[in-house]
Amino acid sequence: MQVRAHIRFLLNDETVETGDVRPDETLLDFLRLRRSLRGTKEGCAEGDCGACTVLVGRLAGDRLVYEAVNACIRFVGSLDGCHVVTVEHLRGADGGLHPVQQAMVGWHGSQCGFCTPGFVMSLYGLWMNRPRPTVHEVEKALQGNLCRCTGYEPIVKAALAISNYGRLEADFLVAERAAVAAHLAALRDGARVEVGSGKARFVIPAGVDDLAAVIAAEPGARIVAGSTDVGLWVTKQMRDIAPVVFIGGLDELRRIAVHPDRIEIAAGASYTEAFDVLSRHIPALGTLIDRIGGEQVRNMGTIGGNIANGSPIGDTPPALIALGATLTLRKGDARRTIALEDFFIDYGKQDRAPGEFVESVCVPLPAQTAHFAAYKVTKRRDEDITATLGAFNLTLDGDGVVASACIAYGGMAATPKRARTVEAALVGKAWNAATVEAALPAYEADFKPLSDMRASAEYRMLVAKNLLRRFLLETSGTQKPFTVRRARAA
């Protein structure tokens, strides 16, 4: 097999080839310290504030896709074959300000200016996909950008006005897209990349089969896809993560297939890539994904990584468990499939053997008669970590009696966990308030939640019970789901 000892990527209009890069070196440090591109700011260093936002272009098949990402938690080693665009590269058709920058100036969207480059890059990513966005689309694109000065209203107005300052067809990245795509395609040589040695080593496999070979030979290596969690291990906990295997560039691990009865999601598919499919076929999952981090995090984070990480407050596992999802694990050429709920054994412990990795997750489509919902409870609505998350999958017979129930929670135990005692208390009973109230004491048998910085044990237990009450209201015809939007609140 061909092996390359350096990474290659396009930085603005320059091709970078380097083997002098650590596995834990962030793109933010590379830009600011090595290239003096200091328009990309460090704010939180954990993917929350968006001051470090840049665009990363990658080939999705033959299509060149640009996405906003957090440079503070994106590792340089994951950029092989990509195009990194920073705020310094932006320019208008006449060489002056870019339309996004002009809109921010025209609508007074910047005050102290520290967060402004990040806002500009996020809005640029939005504008390329939605030249005439709605207010909701703007708000969604800016979930991951924080500002302490403007109150956001001028920034939202600027976002809505970008196309008044320039045509998307005239944008330089649009005009150069074919040339950049050809350049990135030429960088794809099909080689395995191995950089560094010992604990300062990282590998980029040539494909999924090569990934299986790499992990089988080095089972202790850290697999990194989106780095939305592992990035914080480095920036906040100063943990040693090497040797690392970067898998974000493996197209085979980004595939999503829709079948009549199920959706198969490869482990490397990002939340953004899965959103359209999941929201179309299982709307509640689309709503849930919209609450995961900001746009930058959703562009980087993967569903497979959210599962493999094994966090008790991961957002997708409870919902997928309630749907009866299964997991395919691979070791070498051997594969095995298990129920997702069986993957989580204890805190920090999963049913994954040395040399084995998560290859895909299979999500059954709910029956036409099924009621499914997932509710995430946090201190703030957007871009916050879960305190308690409940997912409910329930079917009724013709008489309104509960025929089946699958209920799972995150944040209530050491792992994502089924509420089996509660389920048993519901099945065979009429789906009404009396049945739900009678089932509530069963929660004490299923869960012993902990108190931490996000919520007390008492609060979590009360919320878990109230989510079942909410599910009843929304499925019994007496109450419809309601979300307060900024425009409504104003």
Image (cartoon, rainbow, N blue to C red):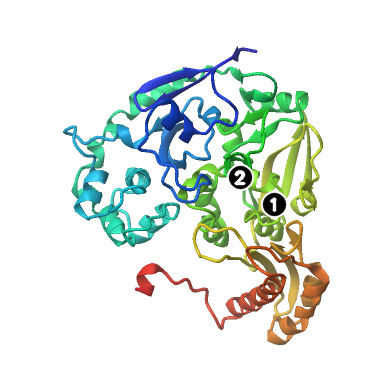
Q: Which mark is residue 229?
A: 2
Residue toward you, 459 or 431:
459
Is 318 in front, or is 23?
A: 23
Badge 1 or badge 2: first in the primary sequence: 2
Contact, mark 1 vs mark 2 (Cβ under 8 Å): yes
The answer to whether residue 412 is left or right of residue 483 is right
Residue 183 in which image quadrant: top left
Hey, what amino acid is under mark 2? Answer: Asp
Q: Is residue 365 visible?
A: yes
Disc 1 to disc 2, C-alpha distance = 10 Å
Is residue 475 positioned above or below 450 on the image?
below
Residue 374 position (above or below residue 275): below
Helix, strand or loop at disc 2?
loop
Work out which residue is located at the far top of the displayed protein and give it: 2
Q: Nearer the viewer, residue 34 or 308?
A: 34
Residue 311, numbered circle: 1
Q: Position of residue 104 (x, y in %)?
A: 25, 50
Where is residue 144? Give x, y as percent: 45, 52
Q: Residue at 26% of width from left, 36% of height from top?
A: 171
